[in-house]
Amino acid sequence: MRDMYPAPNSTPANQQSNLQPQQYSPVGAYFTARYSAQGAVQSQAPGAPINSCYQTPSGHDMRSPQLMSPTQASVPGAVLQAAGTGLTPPVNTALQRNISNMDMQPSSGPAVSSHIRMVQQTTPFYGHDPNVAGSVQSDMCLVGCFFVVIEHEKVLVDRLDVQEIGAVVRLHGGEIEFGVRAYNNVNSDRVTHVICESMRHPLVQQALKRGKRCVTLQWLNDVLSKKHLEAPWRVFHLPTFWTDNHRPATGKIITINGFNENERCGVRMMITAIGARYTPHLTSHNHFLVTKTSEGEKIERCHEMGISVVTYQWLVDIYLGIKNAVNENENCSPIPGMVSDTNATPYNMEHYSEACKQFLFPWKIPIVFANEQWQRALEVKRNVENDKNIFPNKRFRMTTPPPTDEEIETRRSEMGTLKEVPVVCFSGFTPEEKDALGRKVRFLGGATTEKVQECTHLVVLNLWRTLKLLEAIALGKNIVGPNWVSDGYRCRVIPDSLDYFARDDENEKIFGYNLKYSVLKARYRKLFQDVTFYLTPSVEPSYEELLALIELAGGTVLRERPQPQYVIHCIETESLLLLIGNDSDVHLLQYLTDCGMRTFHLFMIYKSLG
């Protein structure tokens, strides 16, 4: 239903906006997925040699480490001995200096590109203790980790993100708390990781001195995608050098070129972290194009429009504070055949700057855990898997088996043709559940469809604000729970819809709406009747989906930006014109916002429908 860094708090001096910023978070890519309980993984033959999460690099192999294979699901045999392996943190007071006491001016010299540097051998970096790492299965990859998330008010869009992140971390064996107060309240010895945005936050400096691993939410996202605990291998896994009111690219508008889907999320985070505004499209308003390749249509258009073309290394230098000024006229043009991979290794990254070296140093100490921690993590994991608020399918259990094809045919021939045939659409169910419910609907003489526009009833598990639910509200459809089907099948009759109208007090309270009232209101009058909208190109989650939703609710959407003459006409005729956009596109509407027109967030549409 809904990817850590907010948009910069300030805009250019000549560009004031009253748009409520649309925050960016990488949560959406991974955390908003609704997880199903995972089965046991297959065992791997024990006894294979286990090394650190990264092999010490050589001149012949500078690639990122490969993902380790999942292993046995039983309690790791070496876990009981983990605490007694003799692995103790080395003392290095020089690296534990408070960053605020260092010279905070970024390095004046240019960074050495990671694809050119040959790294000498160094102390290995670790995830879990090598004695037990091979016995930790992938769905418990965070066991032994205790996370404290700070600055999450900037990073996360709403409190549902907090709930989902907490659930996902616990589902993978970890523990997590949110806020500075949480760090101070728990036993600091238990904390292994601090998830943060800026390396200059006072608590981050304190945690660093205590040997805590300070990383970004993007690191957690990538580790969960790999299902393997390992040291940061991308620059955006480390917190940025910059903090509020000290971001060198404030007011700049940047787009990117040549990065794949997996890379774009982190590069976008780096852009917002240095204070710039990210746009997925290229227009004359852009100041920079960050490119991974030396060729492409965007690069040619930049040359035509006079937009500066810079490399990923340029962004890295600014993000880490190696470079502290952004010159709009500078060009760090890419070289044909260059390598500009976002993936590196900690061995490369610790040479980028002194700050990188400090933040990677704690990863030279393995994470150990005792048998009691393992058992507690398994118990917490089971509790999460059985939580009906997280996995609503747990609430729904088939009390009777579905009818066979022969039974359906026999029943329908006995019934004849119904006067009003219910057409049912489903939302939120597994394919197996949907098939079983669909059979029961057909047994009762009804039909099923995948399109909300064609249905008379939408059957939902809960009232999460999905596109199907919003479409059904806009069209005034009957929205019922699965018991409407189950009870009807048991009684051999189609029940009254109002008796089974869906209710979810928790989600209705979170999203601030009453479902039954919203549906009845939509039946009386189309919500957006006589209302004209303009949607900016980058509006999320999807321009096409929002366009269809507005039109279903009776509204009209302008395909081109409204001209001043049209706006004047709307004012004179008292016609309602609403501008819907996000922070990436606010500069496209500056000519209207300068005149006092308000730009609304897409949540206004959701709230209106609810």
Image (cartoon, rainbow, N blue to C red):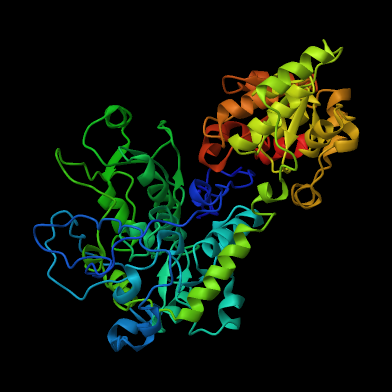
Seen in the image, is 451 located left or right of residue 520?
A: left
Where residue 502 sits in the image (x, y, percent)?
Answer: 81, 40
Quarter of the image holding residue 534? Answer: top right
Quarter of the image holding residue 533? Answer: top right
User: In the image, is residue 375 above or below residue 72?
Assistant: below
Quarter of the image holding residue 399? Answer: top right
User: In the image, is residue 139 above or below residue 491?
Assistant: below
> What residue is rendered at 29% in x and 58% in y?
317
The quadrant in which the N terminus is found is top right
User: In the image, is residue 533 above or below residue 354?
Assistant: above
The quadrant in which the C terminus is found is top right
Can the viewer see residue 594?
A: no
Depth check: give the residue in front, 350 or 495.
495
Depth check: give the residue in front, 496 or 299.
496
List the single residue furthest toward the left. 60
Where residue 423 sits in the image (x, y, percent)?
Answer: 75, 21
Q: How many marks?
A: 0
> What residue is rendered at 90% in x and 33% in y?
498
Where residue 376 sits in the image (x, y, percent)?
Answer: 55, 75
User: In the image, is residue 585 above or below residue 297?
Assistant: below
Can the viewer see residue 59?
A: yes
Seen in the image, is 191 located left or right of residue 288?
A: right
Depth check: give the residue in front, 517 or 46.
46
Where residue 589 sits in the image (x, y, percent)?
Answer: 57, 33
> What residue is rendered at 21% in x and 36% in y?
294
> What residue is rendered at 55% in x and 47% in y?
33
Seen in the image, is 71 located left or right of residue 575?
A: left
Depth check: give the residue in front, 251 or 362.
362
Seen in the image, is 141 located left or right of residue 468?
A: left
